Amino acid sequence: MTLTALDIFDPSSYPTRRDEEWKYSDLSRALREAPSRVDVSNTTSPVTDGAVTFFNGAYPDLNAIVDEGQNRIGLHQVAHPLFEEAFGGQSEAELTVPAGREITLFETYSGWEVWHDGVRTEKDERPYAANTTLHFILGEGARLTRVVILDEPEEAISIRRSTVETAQNSVFKQYVFSTGAKFQRFETHVTNAGHGAEVELNGAYLLKDKRHFDLTTRVTHAEINGVTAQIIRGLVKDSATAVFQGRILVERGADGTAARMRHQALILNDGAHVRAKPELEIYADDVQCAHGNTIGALDPEALFFCQSRGLSEEQARALLTHAFVLPVAEAIEDDDLRAKVLEFLEDKSEDFHAL
């Protein structure tokens, strides 16, 4: 599986709105010139209990961590201020989940952090550009759960892409939670191998101010009896913009495919934008496929009901919007990760509604 070539240090490679895949997210407009290059080598902290902090896009050797017997991997990426001006970093890595193995991957992406002697001393909101790619390969009967938190500065340029190759009877589950950035795109390309392979691509976003978040997914079914399910929920306010592009392709001969996609978003005021483009492309006959897209405002009856129980309008709005995105996090099977994501959503929900 090949991704479109993209080099943040080469402006001629930047896609524009003339590229259909980037129609609603114009990187060339957000990143008008190449950032200063950061050497991402040798900027990864030691692995401790499967958790590793890595700087400026320098992924560790994920397969080496798996070979050591780790079944839980924490990847905590920060932008390390090696330069005073805005800078860029990019890299890619591969993770192979052996047949029958179960791996849980927890990724967090945040902004500038100043470290001394292995300890974070402060956090900064200075801008940066990042372009990272992960390739996941699952063996037969393997299971990979990926939980991602994108908590980046308002002025960051962030492109996070991945490819996923499944195998028979394998399971890939992804949960993405984002608060956006100046330009943020999270892109996932999946090959569903069928023959009992299961894929879930879920996510939630809370966008405010002028933040931009693009969630793009592409799933290809080329074999029989594959399953794909997707649930995306989002909140948008102020002048923020959300983009959802989801496509499921069912090729000829992929009979028995079951694929469902659902995107739901709430726009909380005039001036906020949601661009949604869910697609099903089906060339097989014996399939069960459906997709849906709903974009609206808060239910006035639910708002009235909450206020009639003694809540102020602000409290009622906060309660209803928080409850709107919770189901995505509550579906996470890992108790520890589910608790961490619920805490993140609670904190961001409070910040989301702060005046």
Image (tube, rainbow, N blue to C red):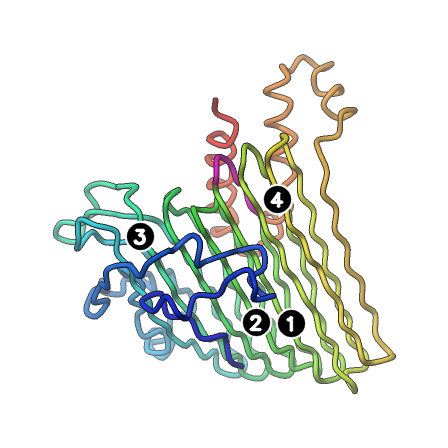
Give me the C-alpha separation between circle 2 and circle 3.
Answer: 25 Å
Give me the C-alpha separation between circle 1 and circle 2.
Answer: 6 Å
Q: Secondary structure at mark 1?
A: strand
Point out the stretch of residues depicted in magenta: 204-210
Looking at the image, tell me whether mark 2 or mark 3 is earlier in sequence order: 3
Position of residue 175 measured from the top left corner of the image (x, y, whole percent)? 55, 57
Residue displayed at 47% across by 46% down: 180
Q: Secondary structure at mark 2?
A: strand
Q: Residues within 10 Å of mark 1 (few under 14, many from 20)?
A: many
Position of residue 179 measured from the top left corner of the image (x, y, whole percent)? 48, 44
Closer to viewer: mark 3 or mark 1: 3
Q: Secondary structure at mark 3?
A: strand
Position of residue 344 measured from the top left corner of the image (x, y, whole percent)? 46, 41
Q: Amino acid at mark 2?
A: His
Closer to viewer: mark 4 or mark 3: 3
On the image, which quarter does residue 255 sit in? bottom right
Q: Amino acid at mark 1?
A: Val
Checking the image for residue 219, the label placed there is 1
Give me the C-alpha separation between circle 3 and circle 1.
Answer: 30 Å
The answer to whether 173 is drawn above or below residue 84 in the figure is: below
Residue identifier under label 2: 189
Residue identifier under label 3: 128
Q: Secondary structure at mark 4?
A: strand
Q: Amino acid at mark 4?
A: Gly
